Amino acid sequence: MTAGASAAAVAVILLGWAVPLPLAAVAGGLLVAGLVGALSWRDGFTGPRLVLVGIALSACAASLTSFLLVRAEITDAQRAVIWLTGSLNGRGWEHVRPVGLALLVLTPLALVLGRRLSLLGLGDDLALALGARVATARVGLVTVAVALAAVATASAGPIAFIALVAPQVALRLARTPSPPLAASAAAGALLVVGADLLARTGLGLLGWSSTELPVGAVTALVGAPVLLWLLQRSVRGRTA
């Protein structure tokens, strides 16, 4: 999803299309998600097929982004690379309002549909036996997830590792069998704000006051080791 949103946004930046950047990013994310669903459907969805198709389309979108960057002027390419890293620099209320409106609509839907996640995790046959509408629930969840990811990418760029680390942090804090949606959202927001604060002030403490990193660089630098540590602990817990 983020790869499709990034490719569409970079195309707008580098090709000069008369399309608002947030709208292009949302459209790119929705397009790739639709392709994943269409190419993965074989009398239903399976996890491995979705993952493989998603990886393939993500690679295609990333290749398109790289091609556009190579062909672009250096100044335009620099602007696009900064956006691709993910940044909150220069964001104002004009960026907050559309995101807030999207959250007002999508967050209640995510919380309502999220009640079906536990049933879907049991497998399609058992979920159907327990009365869940598997196809409807899955389509609804994927649609809301795609829209949320695309809106976030459109507003701040593809900020790395937040979606991977935040649910793991929320899972351990809440001590629940599966990551709670509301706690995961709150953890993600706190991680982004903390990373942005570190990006703006942390380097000044090291004497690099003239340098301000994009928030995506900090989340990748900190998030990757944290995620590896959490996964390692999880593996040890299962083998103990």
Image (tube, helix red, strand yellow):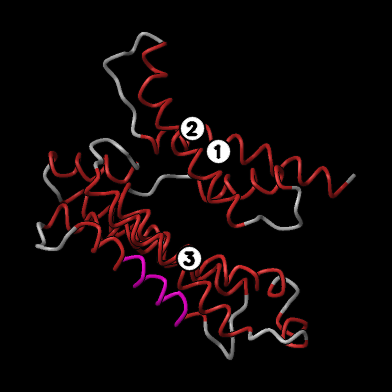
What are the residue bounds of the magenta stretch? 28-38
Q: Residue at x 36, y 70 (%)?
A: 30
Q: Which residue is mark 3?
A: 145
Task: Look at 71% across and 58% down and name the residue there.
Answer: 178
Outermost residue on the right side: it is 240
> Which amino acid is tagged 1?
Ala
Image vertical order of residue 127 relative to residue 219, above or below:
below
Residue 195, by quadrant, is top left
- Give residue 6's position: percent from left, percent from top: 31, 56
Between 127 and 71, the one lying in front of the other is: 127
Query: Magenta stretch: residue 29 in it?
Result: yes
Q: Main secondary structure of the magenta part?
A: helix
Report the residue marked by disc 1: 224
User: Disc number at residue 221?
Assistant: 2
Sequence-first tag of 3 and 2? 3
The relative height of residue 123 versus residue 237 in the rendered view (above or below) is below
Marks 3 and 2, how far apart at CA:
25 Å
User: Where's residue 174, x and y in %?
Assistant: 71, 47
Mark 3 is surrounded, within 10 Å at the Cα level, by few (under 14), some (14 to 19) or many (20 or more) other residues, namely some
Residue nearer the viewer, 59 or 18: 18
User: How many numbered marks have been drawn onto this rendered protein structure?
Assistant: 3
Q: Residue at x 66, y 55 (%)?
A: 179
Side of 127 relative to 24 (left or right): right
Residue 235: x and y in percent read: 78, 46
Under tag 3, what secondary structure? helix
